[in-house]
Image (cartoon, rainbow, N blue to C red):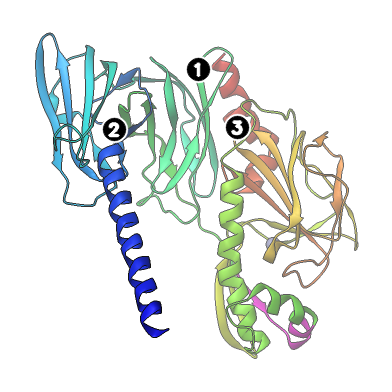
Amino acid sequence: MRKKSTLRFSHIFLLFCLALAGAGAYTLLHDMAGPVIALVPESPERLGPAQPLELSLSDDSGLRSVQVTVRRGGRAMTVLRRDFPKDVREAKLNFDLSETRLPDGAFELEIKARDAAFAGFGAGNSSTLTLPVRMDTQPPRIAVRTVPPAIRRGGSALIVYTVNKDVRETGVRSEDLFFPAYKQADGSWACLFAFPYQKTTATYLPEIMAKDDAGNITSSRLLINAIGRDFSSDTLPISEKFLSMKSAELARLCPEKPDAPTLEQYICVNNGERLRNDAKLLELGQTSNPSFLWKGKFQHLPRSAVKANFGDARTYTSGGKKIDHQVHTGLDLASVARAEVPAANAGRVIFTEELGIYGNIAVIDHGLGLMTLYSHLSEFRVKPGDEVKAGQTVGTTGITGLAAGDHVHFGVLVSGVPVQPLEWLDAKWVQNNISSRLKSGR
Ligand SMILES: [Zn+2]
């Protein structure tokens, strides 16, 4: 019995080895296809010298080599050549054509890859991707039509300009913040941008940029008089009563510290959750209607008192001790409890949700990146997609989010960046800085 079972085992083992060898031979001999080649951008019509190109290669038998060649007028130049070590099945390679110094005009881009299969008496299979492309070395040229003489810290401005070719991306950049421009019916570009309140006249260095579809970029300092502005400061005591009222919400919004004392959770929410919420608003602000949806005057909560201003440097205290510091980025307006909140101007509702520190928040898009937000609402009267008229009720004031008393936190955003609402509430400022600029650009 025992001998028989050993015999059976050796049979099985032999069969297993044969199957393994067969499978190996099959992959070695039956891989008759070359590597799969993919390029990003996929099939570019035009390429600039600095356009980053990403080459992806894959092959089941492993990659052997790749060569990228540029051909023009009977001449060839190797841009990239790589031999792969054993068993590399996938590879991503980045390159550009800056070394080629090709002049403007037609050329051919050839990508030839070889695999490690046994086919072709050991030479492997090859595949070739050949693309007819045009070299374009000309960066876009920007001509400014109108720009206001000055922009104030925390404020907004509108610039109208033309670009001499099709562009993929254009707008005003202030370090890591980008204010996209929107193409107008006459072909010009209109860009609403901000002097972010975090910047000073010394650190605010806006640039106007345009990038074409060949990857050529123009970027230059935007010449505008940046005027400083000091913001006021205030103190916000955090009471025990407030903390106990918000304890469940604070615990929910600070998943990092589920068992910490409520005051500690408050500080956690006022920092971590605030950052997450503001990142969400920044993301919302990057997609807007390409033309203005509003006209005439902007309005805020009628018969209300301003409880806090934009830019207030706010010190939070508890038991007389400083516990936190943040900048207030809107106007706090209070009237009666559950007062009806009017839309500041005509636009389209893009967001009505609960958003952390802001509680129930409604965001209206007014076009060109201009948005207004209404937060701590007790109730929404609109929903995303609604077209609203100026003054139409958006919702009612409340205490949702981190609000202690019934009010609306009214904010104005330019491409998601909070700006001084008082400018937009000033009809004369709007006329001089926005409306008249857009008209003169038409
Ligand atoms: Zn507020």
Quarter where residue 349 is shown? top right
Inter-mark Cα distance, 2 to 3? 54 Å
Residue type, label 1: Ser
Residue type, label 3: Leu
Residue type, label 2: Met
10 left or right, relative to 338: left
Residue at left offset 60%, top offset 65%:
274
**Where does residue 157 sit, x and y in percent of width and height?**
53, 36
**Where does residue 119 sit, x and y in percent of width and height?**
20, 35
Identify residue for label 2: 32
Inter-mark Cα distance, 2 to 1? 54 Å
Inter-mark Cα distance, 1 to 3? 13 Å
Tag 2 secondary structure:
loop
Up-down: is 112 above or below 184? below
Q: Is residue 314 visible?
A: no
Identify residue for label 3: 368
Which badge, 2 or 1, is on the more N-terminal residue?
2
Magenta stretch containing residue 39, yes or no?
no
Badge number at residue 188: 1
Which badge, 1 or 3, is on the more N-terminal residue?
1
Tag 1 secondary structure:
loop
Residue span colored magenta? 234-244
365 left or right, relative to 166: right
Residue at left offset 42%, top offset 43%:
226
Up-down: is 120 above or below 136? below
**Where does residue 173 sit, x and y in percent of width and height?**
41, 40
Q: Are marks 1 and 3 in contact (CB under 8 Å)?
A: no
Q: Residues within 10 Å of mark 3 (few under 14, many from 20)?
A: many
